[in-house]
Image: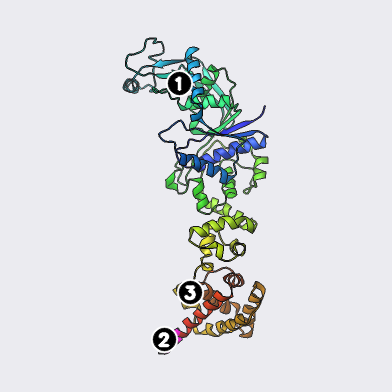
Amino acid sequence: MTVRTRFAPSPTGYLHVGGARTALFSWLYAKRTNGQFILRIEDTDRERSTDESVQAIFDGMEWLGLTHDEGPFFQTDRFPRYKDIIQQLLEQGDAYHCYCSVEEVEAMREEQRANKQKPRYNGRCRHQTEPREGVKPVVRFKNPEQGEVVFDDLVRGTISISNTELDDLIIARSDGTPTYNLTVVVDDIDMNMSHIIRGDDHINNTPRQINIMQALGAQIPSFAHVPMILGDDGARLSKRHGAVSVMQYRDEGFLPEALLNYLVRLGWSHGDQELFSREEMIELFDIKDVNRTASAFNTEKLLWINQQYIMNAKPERLVEPLAQQLKTLGYDVDNGPDLIEIVKTQQERAKTLKEMAEKSSLFYQDYEEFDEKAAKKNLKAAALEPLETMLAKFEALNDWTKEPLHQVVIGTAEALELKLGKVAQPLRVALSGTSVSPAIDATLFILGKETSLKNIQKAIEHIKLKIVAQQG
């Protein structure tokens, strides 16, 4: 049997991390078993489905690298097929027209609640053959009244639901449009799905769908219901927990491989291993190893994983996403410093590419004034001589590369018999305006000779003005 899995989102918003994890589990299981992964867009809710949401799903899947083998298929293209199946179920006696109004169905449920019964449709129209004048009926599936639905969930184990717990669900609305539980069954049958991996919020739909599949004489696929993702506070993950859109994580400077690595560990593990390449995920992942309990989303852990990927990435890998972050900040990357050099300089210092871009601002814009605390501590009268000495040496330097620049700083400290910090820190503040910057030689190299000399001169003038003010 060829394994066929699918990801079937509704295009009513962005691709969220819960959906991305479901897609990842389905994709990994298909890849591990040399199967096929199908993308299906369940867009029958025309009021809420939008083209923008469809594109957001495509963008998210592409950014994560979860490529599909077939599709994308759109349910709205398959309405004639659903209509045929509804008619087939009517003709074989497994569905019927229901003329009960919304108000009548709600009255039934209110009465059942009052009697401490489970609210449900009571099958009033099951045996009605005459239509009600002026009423457009819905179509309901005639659920078996006896027996039970039993299936072996690959995550949760054996699940058994009595058919007496299930009422006759609507499979076609009064305007003829099909409902979710009908369309998903038809699609899974027609697309030969072997394994349906989805969130456990669908677990109540599964016995209903199995009954429809059996009525249609279809082979029942294997089901795996993965637990939901919770926020740090134990509540279901939502917008109030911060970024939950996949593309928002991209905008915040996360790498797709880091997000995938984090998502695969939400509910699945392989010993104590934390970091997995894509190839390792495919080799090691098995849906049967997914935990039954819900997992909590931990942003700090994601940041740590992202930092590991940034630190260990080839600099070339980070150039394009860093460029996008810098452009977002309004910097002209096409006429700026070499991005490879910036990446090499900043790789060890940033948890996200957004943070890396923000820490690289000194390479794209002059600082307007010194950080007050940094200047007070480091731009003292004692710093004047080492800064003037280095300025003269830098002016005379023809080879503006890291090693000669480093030797100027070291040589100045030795010549003036000063500790390195007494030379390097005033220079750092001179170059960046603050007490924090990348390595001095790298900062000098990336800033270039002209900007570096100008900034050092600015610091010298600042010290001289301070000395005059103190003397006067």
Identify the element where label 3 is drawn. helix
Q: Is residue 91 above or below residue 3?
A: above
Quadrant including the C terminus: bottom left
Residue drawn at (64%, 81%) of the image: 411
Q: Main secondary structure of the magenta part?
A: helix
Q: Amino acid at mark 2?
A: Ala
- Reply above or below: 32 against 159: below
Can residue 140 be seen here?
yes
Q: Mark 1 is on which residue type?
A: Leu
Residue at 66% x, 76% y is 399
- The Cα atoms of the two marked residues, 2 and 1, are separated by 87 Å
Image quarter of residue 45: top left
> Measuring 54% from the left and 68% from the top, which residue is drawn there?
363
Image x and y of residue 272, in percent: 63, 46
| Residue that label 2 marks | 469
Residue where numbered disc 1 is placed: 166
Residues shaded magenta: 465-471
Q: State the mark number for residue 374.
A: 3
